[in-house]
Amino acid sequence: MKKQDRITIIVPCYNEEETIPIFVEEMNKIYTRMKKKYDIQMEYLFVDDGSKDNTLEVMKETAENNPHVSFISFSRNFGKEAAMFAGLENADGNYVVIMDVDLQDPPELVEQMYHEIKNSHYDCIASRRVDRKGESPIRSFFAKMFYKIIRKISKINIMPGARDFRMMTRQMVDSIVSLREYNRFSKGIFQWVGFETKWLNFENRNRVAGTTKWSFWGLLVYAIEGVIAFSTAPLALSSIIGIVFCVIALIMVVIFFVRAMIWGDPVSGWPSLACIICFTAGIQLFCNGITGLYLSKTYSEVKGRPQYIIKTKHQCQKNNSKDSDES
Ligand code: UDP
Ligand code: MG
């Protein structure tokens, strides 16, 4: 007998009391449609990332009314990366999807992803936005810059506009979970583990309710973490800057020596000297900072703290018979 496929949908949530019911309603429509075509069972695994609003209560209520809902609630906000990791560690479906709760990830693509993954050799069907409509121009500009830079300086090839929204095989999920690093940058990890990925394009959508949890500063820190996690180019850059400044200094020594020999050495030029000292000190601090960033990341890795701490957990009913599946 052919085994029924179980799809686990991981949904990280931070202050999403308004969006969860809308998400469940939309996804249930997709699930009902998919069940008519395929022999599947779908489970939603919500991860409450230490929300400060009623997200957990809404999850509890949803789980009471829907036998396909599981949830995990963190003791505090650990960030989306930790929420995704917790989801991946706790998901037991043979196909696993990661999806935002705000419906910016089109739910109808889940059906297409399942169709593609079943009927092809791909291990991952991922999604990418082909535009950034509705996003602020400054944010779009920096996002584009970030992708350009990280593609140049790291070995991994992150697709521009790539979302975390994707369906993966159990084998790929197990590989991702086997990477235990503390400073996680999932977009890089998805690429790093290898396997074959097919990309589905879609046009950007706005949030269905609530507001984005990412500030400009938050995104900048995330971008720096991405670079540090997947490239050591900034360290090399600081060495190169050091070498360039040594060469400039040597040339200056020669020039000033020759000049002093020919025209003597009047005490002048101290303002320019002060500028040079300030400038080189600045460069030195900048390079120290780069080294410090890597050191701090190493420090947090060495401490080996857990990615997240679970406060409450609810596991949905497993192995529901096909008839009792309601959605
Ligand atoms: N999220 C999370 N923890 C956080 C921030 C965000 O779990 O610390 C979740 C959030 O609830 C949503 C997803 O990550 O489901 C994407 O967040 P958001 O929509 O705010 O980001 P954007 O789409 O604006 O990049
Ligand atoms: Mg969003």
Image: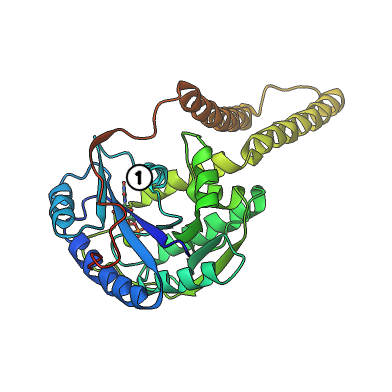
- The colour scheme used to paint the residues is rainbow
Q: How many marks?
A: 1
Residue extending farthest front: 1
Residue 226 as seen in the image, left or right of residue 136? right
The front one of 203 and 63 is: 63
Tell me: residue 318, above or below residue 251: below
Q: Within 10 angstroms of label 1, few (less than 14), some, or many (20 or more) residues?
A: many
- Asked whether mark 1 lies closer than 8 Å to ligand 1, one says yes
> Circle 1 sits in a helix, a strand or a loop, which is it?
helix
- Residue 130 showing in the rendered view: no
Residue 248 as seen in the image, left or right of residue 202? right
Residue at 40%, 59% in the rendered image: 6
Q: Amino acid at mark 1?
A: Ala
Residue at 46%, 74% in the rendered image: 112
Q: Quadrant of the C terminus?
A: bottom left
| Residue that label 1 marks | 83
Query: Residue 251: image x %, image y %?
Result: 81, 32
Residue at 52%, 71% in the rendered image: 116
Query: Residue 300: image x %, image y %?
Result: 46, 26
